[in-house]
Image (cartoon, rainbow, N blue to C red):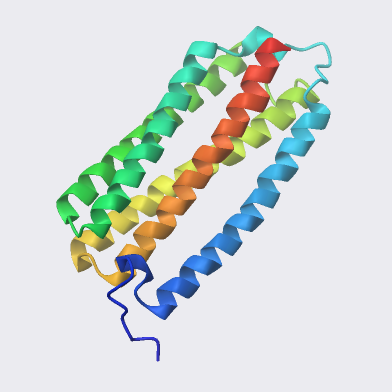
Amino acid sequence: MSANVNHSLPLEYQTEQNRLNILGFWIFLGAEIVLFATLFAVYGVLGHRYAGGPTPSDIFKLNDVLIETLLLLTSSFTCGLAVFFMRQRDMKKLLVWFIITLLLGAGFLFMEIREFIHYVHEGATMQTSAFLSSFFVLLGTHGAHVTFGIIWAIMLIIQLLQRGLTPMTARKMFIISLYWHFLDVVWIFIFTFVYLKGMVG
């Protein structure tokens, strides 16, 4: 069986099962890339069809978007610190930085929900135009992924407190960090090709 442990490798890679699970998650992220690439393509086609409704420059608020970006990118850094301390087998610092990551993610979600409420009050809903339909689907899908990531992370924190730091919990921690970094990369594309392009255009 794959119970052999290779202590020369990082904690999350020490068993063959862990290495296979991490490889499987990379394949899953490939499918996620296809999903978001499709949503970006739809937005690229429909993003200029305003149907007499508001345009990006009418509704986008740069300050709020910058705060959202700062929160999410900072959470990527703190998530990296959590993985660093996991490899140092420092459970306390791992949990501290991981919880900070979740708080930053929750702050991002709060700002995004507030942003969506602002759009609705401005008369910008999914039914208003093709631009807003594709916009809300793209950002809503990303926001749903962030929400799922936070719930997943809370469950992992509970497991870490119950079972401690083992090759299995380390593998789960590493996999969720890959997921979180992926969401940050997607947000960079959203910030660039949706918000910045929309405001400049």
Res. 186 image quadrant: top right
Res. 116 image quadrant: top right
State the residue in front, 114 or 188.
188
Residue reaching furthest to the top? 58
Q: Is residue 124 visible?
A: no
Q: Position of residue 132 (x, y in %)?
A: 72, 24
Q: Is residue 34 visible?
A: yes
Q: Which quarter of the image is occupied by the C terminus?
A: top right
Instruction: Please give the name of the residue rendered at 78% of the width and 36% of the height, measured from the top-left corner.
Output: 42
State the residue in front, 117 or 18.
18
Instruction: Please give the name of the residue rendered at 40% of the width and 92% of the height, measured from the top-left corner.
Output: 1
Q: Position of residue 10 (x, y in %)?
A: 32, 65
State the residue in front, 58 or 96.
96
Q: Position of residue 80 (x, y in %)?
A: 35, 45
Q: Is residue 166 left or right of residue 146?
A: left
Res. 72 image quadrant: top left
| On screen, residue 23 above or below 149 | below
State the residue in front, 159 or 166.
166
